[in-house]
Image (tube, rainbow, N blue to C red):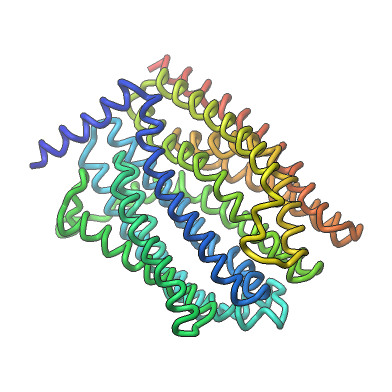
Amino acid sequence: MENAIKQTDNSRLDSFIANPRKAIWTLGLPVMMGMAVQTLYSIVDMLFVARISVNAIAALGFNLPLFWMAMGISFGLGTGVTAVIARFIGAKDHEAATNVAEHGLLLGLVIGGIFSVIGLVFGEQIFRALGTPDELLGDTLAYFRVIAGGFTFMITGIFLRSIFSGEGDTKTPVKIQVTSTVVNIILDPILIFGLDMGVRGAALATVLSMLLAVAMYSRVILIKKQTLLQLNFAIFKLNFSFFKDIFRIGIPSSVSMIIMSLGAALYNWILVHYGPNVVAGFQVAGRLDQIFFLPIMAIAGSLVTLVGMFYGAQRFDLITQVIKDGLRYGITIGMGTGVLFYIIAPYVFKIFTDDAVVNEVAISVIRTFAPFYWLIAIGMISGRALMGLGTGIPSLVITAIRVAIVSGPLAYYFAVILGKPYQWVWYGSVVAIIVAAGTSITWLVLRTRKIKRNLATT
């Protein structure tokens, strides 16, 4: 059985080596389909929440920074798990890859438990510290307390999905994600309106769908044993060197997500001074942005696995080829999507709400950022490629520059000190996007040149 698994494992690696350009889409398209379903849920969820009130949308906006902080830390460390597993598979060390997967699952359970406890105990203090207005605090806490109770399931699910990504299987996670998302969409109206739970119903639908996903992942991995990496905790032994490898790649990415979450919280604090409708408009615009991110994140995610495998196999020629292809695809998609969204923006947001201010803000957001989508693609794809090469520090540094040094201070300066209209908050972010794209692509070029020199001397 083990030999058959290894042969399948090597066959997948060989197919990626034979056609790396096809491999980007072999890995990326299933991810994009899964994310498309998730985006559909996000849009439907916002439609249901919008039927409650504009304040409910704003309350959801105040939740998102903390939600994405927890998810971001988990995705960062999960990317570390993916990259390390992929590198060992590329080196054809099946035993080490399996052990890394076991360490990753353990890590997910521990982190999920910690976040649940912190969220349930300190939720109100956190939101007050973030400047949540009293009129929004009730709905904000009602949503968050349910979400915090489910952090264990959400975060564990992320690490389970990372195991599949590391071994190059993106189809199984998509099937599970589609199923859980459909369940989420079905539960939303039942819990929000049928049981009159309001925003708590939206949160509970999310938690229950994540619990279902974890149950499905566990069945495939631990019961049916259909994965290439056969986990066996009966003979599991802690190896802190694996944690070290995961943390080296994952912690910088996780800290990057923390910085972005704090930046989003700062944005909410700044925007709420213009009124809850402006916060709501910013959140509604984000639902259209998510559609642009679908193919970009799929390409970026596939590069973590492919670059990691090719790095482990010491195939620098394939590393450079797959990075160039990924960047070319990302730039093309970014430009095309930017033009499309700029044109359709005035007609899209009326499906969410008829509030004139919310619509005006959402249109302003999209029409400011759409021309720069291609630069966002460069930054995201370059950062993920660097993770595949075994380093997460560039992602941290670039995010710190973008959020903490450029966009955050500029937004505060324009809005609070100068008292400019809310549109000036977006202008600060545009400057940050340009700086981040230039920094990330430069770092990627320098890193690949260094690796090429090192491989040439070995």
x then y, percent, for residue 366: 70, 48
Residue at screen point 10% across, 36% down: 3
> Picture quarter containing residue 55?
bottom right
- Quadrant that contains the C terminus: top left
Residue at screen point 51% across, 23% down: 324
Relative to 438, does residue 414 appear above or below in the rendering? below
Relative to 186, does residue 10 appear above or below in the rendering? above
Q: Is residue 156 visible?
A: no
Q: Is residue 351 left or right of residue 144?
A: right
x then y, percent, for residue 348: 64, 53
Q: Is residue 188 visible?
A: yes
x then y, percent, for residue 48: 54, 70
> Picture quarter containing residue 233?
bottom left
Residue at screen point 55% across, 81% down: 142
Q: Is residue 5 left or right of residue 68?
A: left
Residue at screen point 91% across, 57% down: 418
